[in-house]
Image (tube, rainbow, N blue to C red):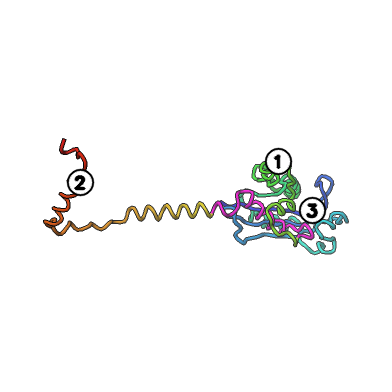
Amino acid sequence: MREIVLDTETTGLDPNNGDRVVEIACLELLHHIPTGRTYREYINPERDMPEEAARIHGLTSDFLSDKPVFSQVAGGFLDFIAGDTLVIHNASFDIKFLNAELKREGLATIPMSRALDTVALARDRFPGAQVSLDALCRRFEIDNSARTFHGALLDCELLAEVYLELRGGRQPGFALENAAAAAAAAKARSAAPRPQRPARPHVPTPEELAAHEAMLEGLTDPVWKN
């Protein structure tokens, strides 16, 4: 089962007000486990970078000035995510921005039905608790000390660990694998041919017969004498 952990960084909060995507990062999962394949692009937003946004992700207009525009990275991005489920923290935010960029290029948008929102997943599991990425890292004891800025790829890596924990962690899967292996081994043992024991090689000796009779005489009111 292939899933894509996805995160974006932007110039602000609303694409309808002219805000743009400035970074896209993706991380591939197979059966909820990272494969090591990633995608990352910095994007020239073709506008200024507000100071409050730069304080969050650390990306400045100077840094982004020589980066490709969205139209130049759209094909590679769409190829990487293919048709697979997108694991996103606060999915409506990222999907809204990505669809605004895709619409601008005349490309098909991403339906919300493709997104698995880890915020909703965390709220279902921990009602009333904080469900920010930092809060979930603390809950699951995931080291996020490198998160001085909201970098999209680092956030994908952290979210992949959080998502695995929200799905039950590594141990349940290992336990199932061990149980399956034990069952297979037991089945193999039961199917293995068993050696036949040889017949008793001798008849009872007179001494054995006499001892047997003496043992029977010692029984009180045996049923076979009634």
Question: Residue, x 55% and y 51% (percent of image)?
Answer: 172
| Residue beneath disc 3 | 10
Within 10 Å of the Cα at label 3, are there few (<14), some (14-19), or many (20+) other Cα atoms?
many
Tell me the magenta residue range.
147-173
Task: Say if mark 1 contacts mark 3, CB within 8 Å.
Answer: no
Foreground mark, 2 or 1, reads 2
Q: Earlier in the sequence, mark 1 or mark 3?
A: 3
Q: Which of the numbered marks, if any, corresponds to residue 50?
A: none
Q: CA distance from mark 2 to mark 1?
A: 75 Å
Q: What residue did someone put label 1 on?
A: 127
Q: Secondary structure at mark 3?
A: strand
The residue under label 2 is 218
Q: Are there few (<14), some (14-19), or many (20+) residues within 10 Å of tag 2?
A: few
The percent position of residue 104, horizontal first and vertical second, equals 76, 48
Query: Is residue 23 one of those drawn in magenta?
Result: no
Mark 2 belongs to which amino acid? Answer: Gly
